[in-house]
Amino acid sequence: MKARFYAGAAALALFAGTAHADGHQPFAVGEGAFNWDSYNQIADAYDLSGQTVEITGPWTGDEKAKADKVFSYFTSATGATVNYSGSDSFEQDIVISARSGSAPNLAVFPQPGLAADMASQGLLTPLADGTADWVRDNYAAGQSWVDLGTYADQNGEDQMFGLFYRVDLKSLVWYSPEAFDEAGYDIPETMEELKDLTDLIVEEGGTPWCIGLGSGAATGWPATDWVEEMMLRTQAPEDYDAWVTNEMKFDDPKVIAAIEEFGAFARNDAYVDGGASAVANTDFRDSPTGLFSIPPKCYLHRQASFIPAFFPEGTELGEDADFFYFPAFADKDLGKPVLGAGTLFAITNPSEATTAFLEFMKAPIAHELWMAQGGFLTAHAGVNPETYVEDSLRAQGDILRNATTFRFDASDLMPGEIGAGAFWTGMVDYTTGASAEDVAKGIQERWDTIQ
């Protein structure tokens, strides 16, 4: 696994040598590991001098700076100007501007819920014919991305409105390579093997898992991720989708079974650092520190790709910490599902240059240019993985490319009172002793009051 990180250092050196002299475009056209053919195809297809594409979205600060660099290559290829404005209040701003007739050409939505709402109100324009087929053919788990970008229009007819771009990954298990090597543990490739490893660690006197649900007013959300992961690994994607919309009730036996799959890990005193009673009271930011104790207080921690920000200072990825895919059950025949999130582009004010810009966003180069700046993952199957600036990102990209199903975090798609309320608190109640049946029933009763 260390080789992944050495390769990343080599990639950094390569890109460092291709920076533009003007400092605005960091990579010289035609150089490096990028797919410049896709750039040239855009340049040959469009002359948009004098035209402008207005975009708004949630990216601010460093993320805006990276996006601006990517968009500058559309300008150099086509002559069109791109004006991107980021806002911390994007969700409110885009609705106001769209309803007042002053919307930008494109909006970058941080999740599909608001996009679906605006599509149903006639505030979005469907993507070009053939986009769905293109996504199926060019994105890993392509049908998932078509589903996530398809919403009912104002007439109730499903159309594809969203083109996904940047992806976040949750389906990861973190561990210490040194601790694994010393104990002789292998990376599990199935859920059955993960459960066997959990039992083996206990048999050998260790504690398998670090789990913490504490997060201030948001306490409980890490457990919702666990349940979502288990829903994807025990039930069909269609069941997951029905659960998110409450077509399948929260107290359905399938949902209760997923909650209990989480409980098999979190409610077993022998499985969790500090015992089951510590799970609800341990802050999620502190929970992975047991991986790095000597001897280890735990060997495994399931959490999203952001968690290294809370590892002890000086922790080196690939050396002190690494990750593997939170595996699927071998006997369920559900492929390799992945849980995460992502941002999508949607048309709020169509124009010729807007259509061309979306063609650019479909090109591998538009993804690789951010991949090479860091902090970016994509499901685009046509990109060159060598353009990832870090090997940890490259490895996460591999997980996305191998996924057969991708689904959004369910709690983010549910009504706020459920996904950011009853679901969170219900998981705390379950972890501290309530039955899965009672918790699920309580969440469903709350949902019934907001129908």
Image (spheres, rainbow, N blue to C red):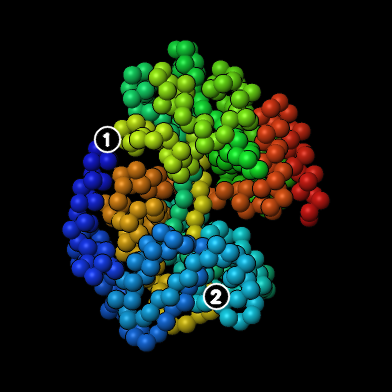
Residue at image coords 67%, 72%: 121
Image quarter where the C terminus lies is bottom right
Residue on which disc 1 sits? 2
Q: Is residue 87 above or below residue 139?
A: below
CA gap between label 1 and label 2 equals: 45 Å
Q: Is residue 426 visible?
A: yes
Q: Is residue 160 visible?
A: no
> As drawn, is 281 to the left or to the right of 136?
right
Of the residues under marks 1 and 2, which one precedes in the sequence? Answer: 1
Q: Amino acid at mark 2?
A: Thr
Residue at image coords 60%, 28%: 279
Task: Decide which of 299, 21 is in the foreground and name it.
Answer: 21
Residue at image coords 51%, 80%: 350
Question: Where in the figure is residue 5, as x and y percent of width and height?
Answer: 27, 41
Q: Is residue 367 above or below residue 205?
A: below
Q: Secondary structure at mark 1?
A: helix
Residue on which disc 2 sits? 348
Quarter-of-image position of residue 381: bottom left
Question: Where in the figure is residue 285, as x and y percent of width and height?
Answer: 52, 36
